[in-house]
Image (tube, grey):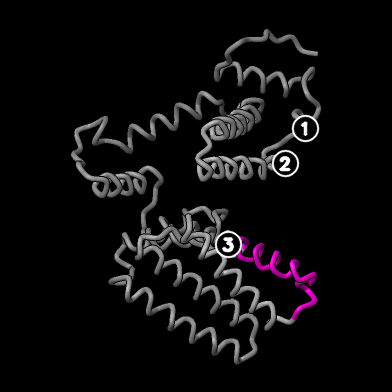
């Protein structure tokens, strides 16, 4: 057991001390064994839980989940401190310097009265500080670990800043139809590699259309998935009421229940 004074209120310094103690010889065996790689997925999970709290508009949950993300930052920083590579203080120092450099309209003499002007300055400064010499560099710097829809939308947005983009939303939407025709031809050919490629192109064109329409593609798909789950749930309830099992029914019959479920949900929405 390690000695640690109990408090009514703790600070970021206390969090750093607690993580240091957990990683120490007299601390927790599990915490000592962890590496960047072993807890990599935990960081993603904690971040997603923050997003869930935001979506739920749950302030108490948001506070808790932000703490879990902060723990991840402190924990990863501690691993680096133990190897004398960098410290948590250096993490804070670097992000503060980055914020000051990228906000010359606040901390300098540059004028930027609108969000568009701010973003234009931000992109220009980011290219310089990150040593990005070409527009392609800005595209390849988008993290490959991002969810595919989010990454596609970000890449499309950066290509737009280089002038490579559809003229309007109508053109972007028309591209969806063109890509669908190419997918149909690939399916007819029976070549699975071509099908996968054309399906990817179709998805990418949908993301571009979403961007031009001012829609977050990731959020749009999340909403549609949630809607599907809700309708699936009502469909299953309808089937169960007749003492049937969904998997035993032909798709034609399930479609009838599916349409009934849609009408029930629409009626619920109307009455709210």
Residue 55 or residue 72, whichever sits in front: 55
Check residue 218 for magenta coloring: no
Which residue is at a point 50% across and 30% down the rendered structure image? Answer: 91
Check residue 235 for magenta coloring: yes
Q: Earlier in the sequence, mark 3 or mark 1?
A: 1
**Magenta span dominant secondary structure:** helix
Task: Name the element at disc 2.
Answer: loop
Q: Which residues are magenta?
A: 229-249
Task: Name the element at disc 1.
Answer: helix
The answer to whether mark 2 and mark 1 are in CB contact below 8 A is yes
Q: Earlier in the sequence, mark 2 or mark 1?
A: 1
Q: Could one spot residue 125 in this view of the protein? A: yes
Q: Which residue is mark 2?
A: 38
Q: Which residue is mark 1?
A: 33
Measured Cα–Cα span from mark 3 to mark 2? 30 Å
Residue 53 or residue 92, whichever sits in front: 53
| Above or below, comparing residue 169 to residue 220 in the picture | below
Left or right of residue 200, residue 129 in this image: left
Left or right of residue 33, residue 167 in this image: left
Measured Cα–Cα span from mark 2 to mark 1? 9 Å
Q: Which residue is mark 3?
A: 225
Give the foreground label among 3 and 2.
Answer: 3
Q: Where does the image place residue 110, in percent across and percent down from the top left?
A: 20, 37
The answer to whether mark 3 and mark 2 are in CB contact below 8 A is no
Left or right of residue 236, residue 76 in this image: left
């Amino acid at each position: 057991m390690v000695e640690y004074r109990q408090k009514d209120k703790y600070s970021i310094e206390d969090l750093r001390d607690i993580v240091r103690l957990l990683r120490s010889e007299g601390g927790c065996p599990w915490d000592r064994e962890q590496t960047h790689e072993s807890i990599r997925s935990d960081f993603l999970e904690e971040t997603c839980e923050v997003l869930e709290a935001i979506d739920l508009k749950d302030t108490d949950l948001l506070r808790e989940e932000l703490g879990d993300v902060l723990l991840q930052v402190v924990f990863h920083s501690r691993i680096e401190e133990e190897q004398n590579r960098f410290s948590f203080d250096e993490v804070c120092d670097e992000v503060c310097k980055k914020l000051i450099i990228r906000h010359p309209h606040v901390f300098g003499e540059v004028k930027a009265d609108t969000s568009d002007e701010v973003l234009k300055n931000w992109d220009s400064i980011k290219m310089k500080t990150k040593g990005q010499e070409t527009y392609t560099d800005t595209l390849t710097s988008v993290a490959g670990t991002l969810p595919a829809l989010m990454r596609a939308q970000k890449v499309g947005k950066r290509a737009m800043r280089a002038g490579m983009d559809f003229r309007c939303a109508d053109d972007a939407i028309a591209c969806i139809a063109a890509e669908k025709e190419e997918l149909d031809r690939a399916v007819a050919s029976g070549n699975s590699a071509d099908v996968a490629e054309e399906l990817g192109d179709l998805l990418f064109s949908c993301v571009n259309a979403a961007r031009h329409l001012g829609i977050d593609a990731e959020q749009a798909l999340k909403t549609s998935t949630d809607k599907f789950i809700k309708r699936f749930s009502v469909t299953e309830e309808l089937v169960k009421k007749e003492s049937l099992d969904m998997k035993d029914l032909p798709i034609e019959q399930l479609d009838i229940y599916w349409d009934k479920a849609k009408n029930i949900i629409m009626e619920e929405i109307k009455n709210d």
